């Protein structure tokens, strides 16, 4: 296998892992105690 193919496959795998992490493993955001029920931009 050529080194160019290996690098291309690694980039594809890295991009796929990044997208999976970004969209499926979202961090739960904790709202501040003084926000109330409206969205005041405190997150």
Image (tube, grey):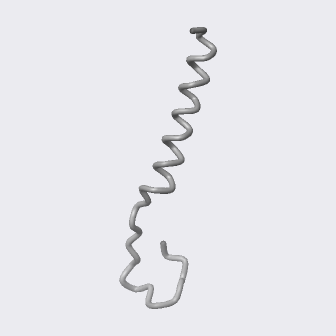
Total numbered badges shown on the rendered structure: 0
Residue at (57, 25) in percent of width and height: 9
Task: Return the x and y of residue 25 as percentages of the image width and height.
Answer: 42, 56
Horizontal relation, residue 7 to residue 17: left or right: right
Q: Residue furthest front?
A: 1
* In the depicted structure, whether residue 42 falls above or below residue 35: above
**Residue 18 picture location, percent across and down:** 51, 43
- Given residues 17 and 1, the one toward you in this image is 1
Residue at 41% across / 69% down in the picture? 29
Residue visible at 57% across and 29% down in the picture: 11
Left or right: 25 with respect to 16? left
Vertical arrangement, residue 12 with respect to residue 32, above or below: above
Rendered image quadrant of residue 6: top right
Q: In this view, does 25 lie to the left or right of 40?
A: left
Which residue sits furthest top? Answer: 2
Residue 5: percent from left, percent from top: 61, 17
- The quadrant where residue 12 appears: top right
Location of residue 2 in the rendering, given as x and y in whole percent from the top left corner: 60, 8
Say which of 34 and 1 sits in front: 1
> 7 above or below 36?
above
């Amino acid at each position: 296998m050529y080194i160019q193919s290996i690098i291309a496959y690694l980039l594809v795998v890295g991009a796929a892992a990044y997208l999976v992490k970004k969209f499926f493993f979202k961090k739960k955001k904790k709202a501040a105690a003084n926000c109330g029920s409206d969205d005041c931009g405190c997150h």
